[in-house]
Image: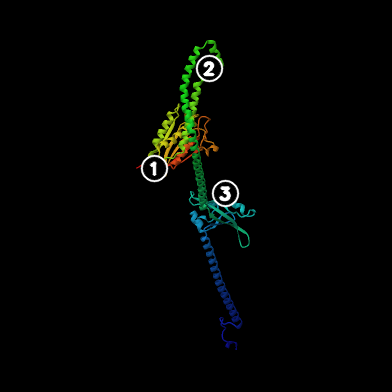
Amino acid sequence: MGQNQPPHNPLELNDGQEHAWVEVIQKMDEVYSDLLEREVDLENKNAELEEAHDFIDSILEAMSDVVIVCDRVGRIVKVNGPLLERTGFEEAELFGRPISVLLGTQFGEHFRKLIPPTKSKNLQDYETKLQHKNPDISEYVSVNCSLHKTARGQVDGLVIVGRPIGELRQAYDDLNKAHVELKTAQHHLLQSEKMASIGRLVAGVAHELNNPISFLYGNVHSMERYSQKMRTYIETLREELPVSVRQKLDEDLKIKRLLDDLPNLLAGTREGAERVSEIVNNLRRLSFREGKTKDCVDICDVIKTAVLFASKGRASNHPIELDLSNDLYVEGSANRLHQVILNLVENALDASSAQPDTPIIVRAEKHNANVNIYVRDCGNGVSDDDLHRIFDPFFTTKPVGQGTGLGLWISYEIVQDHKGHISVHNHTNGGAEFKVSLPAYACE
């Protein structure tokens, strides 16, 4: 019986084995299906992440401010496009480099104070220089810094947002410059109004003084002639008197001393009258403005003539250096401009009397639309208190009896009549320097 059974096939499965394989295949299908779902979900999340990343990058690129993200040790991990545009760097050149490459070593010290365990607060409105790839280029930025934390709240670094303030600083400088120019213009306007008011006042005073001064001046000349005749007459009468009577009269009346002092008294009176007459003439000259007729004036010729006049009128031959450009012409009165330069050179000679070997420097040049004339002495300069009133009438820094205080006032008026400007400052190398600026003129 056993010999009549068919042989066993190894590929044939019993019911239990077949059921096991079915379960394995089902599990594999479930795992595969789960993997497919997870892959789809992962791809969706990855797409969302990329979309969020692109959104953040687009915001960073759209910002006008510069953004720098660095790690806990101050190495750069992220920057935005505006920073790259302003610094000339490529992003790869900055990645992993210290923050001092962009914001300088001083900011690096502040950075260390901001990272825990320090307790410093966030840095707000800190002004520093944003370094360029070219070492010769930089610009100021105002930065705000805050800590960058992970999802678990751990400090991971620092986020730095900077706003360039170069344009703001330039606008502030322009505003400050305009303010200074406005104050200067206001000062000049007030000075001009003050000069005009004083000019009207002194015109009347000069007119009232002119007549009595003329009488005094003329009478002094007559008295000088009369005194000589009276002296001859008195001496003749003295010779007719007895000696004892003559000696008695001489002792009581001091006739000899009187006759000897009379010429000096009259000479002093005449000098005083001439001085007062000169002051009155200067005052009268201020009350009149020149007509509209103007000539083409060669400033170099005017300066050379004024320097010659001032030098020849001095006992000492003080050196004067001339530095004059060519073709310097203005429109106006050569005589009145000559008076301005002569006043300035004479004042410079007076101020430089203690330095007889140091030259006075007179130079002239054309700058833009103006002809500028500079007269620099080698004296002690002008005190700060006197600088703002140096052109006031009757103000002088010279000793009593050596200056009327009208020369610079007259010069100021003449320059104003020529639509120019005169100023004074203390030179950095010592001494005072006067500057006369007149509109340049092209002679036909």
Name the residue type under label 2.
Answer: Ile
Q: x%, y% of residue 126? A: 57, 52
Which residue is under mark 2?
255
Mark 1–mark 3 Cα distance, whole angstroms, equals: 54 Å
Instruction: Tell which of 375 and 186 is nearer to you.
Output: 186
Name the residue type under label 1.
Answer: Tyr
Mark 3–mark 2 Cα distance, whole angstroms, equals: 93 Å
Name the residue type under label 3.
Answer: Gln
Answer whether residue 348 is visible to the viewer in this image: no
**Callout in the foreground (1, 3):** 1
Q: x%, y% of residue 305? A: 40, 33
In the rendered image of this protein, does residue 189 appear above or below residue 273? Answer: below
Mark 1–mark 2 Cα distance, whole angstroms, equals: 67 Å
Dot 3: element = helix
Residue in view at x 51 percent, y 23 percent: 265
Which residue is under mark 1?
441
In the rendered image, the quadrant that contains the N terminus is bottom right
**Callout in the foreground (1, 2):** 2
Dot 2: element = helix
Residue 300: name its quadrant.
top left
In the rendered image of this protein, does residue 206 appear above or below residue 35? Answer: above
Residue in view at x 52 percent, y 55 percent: 94
Dot 1: element = loop
Most extreme residue toward the top, as rendered? Answer: 243
- Is disc 2 surrounded by few (<14), some (14 to 19) or many (20+) residues within 10 Å? some
Answer whether residue 259 is visible to the viewer in this image: yes
Task: Describe the colour scheme in one phrase.
Answer: rainbow
In the rendered image, the quadrant that contains the C terminus is top left
Which residue is under mark 3?
106
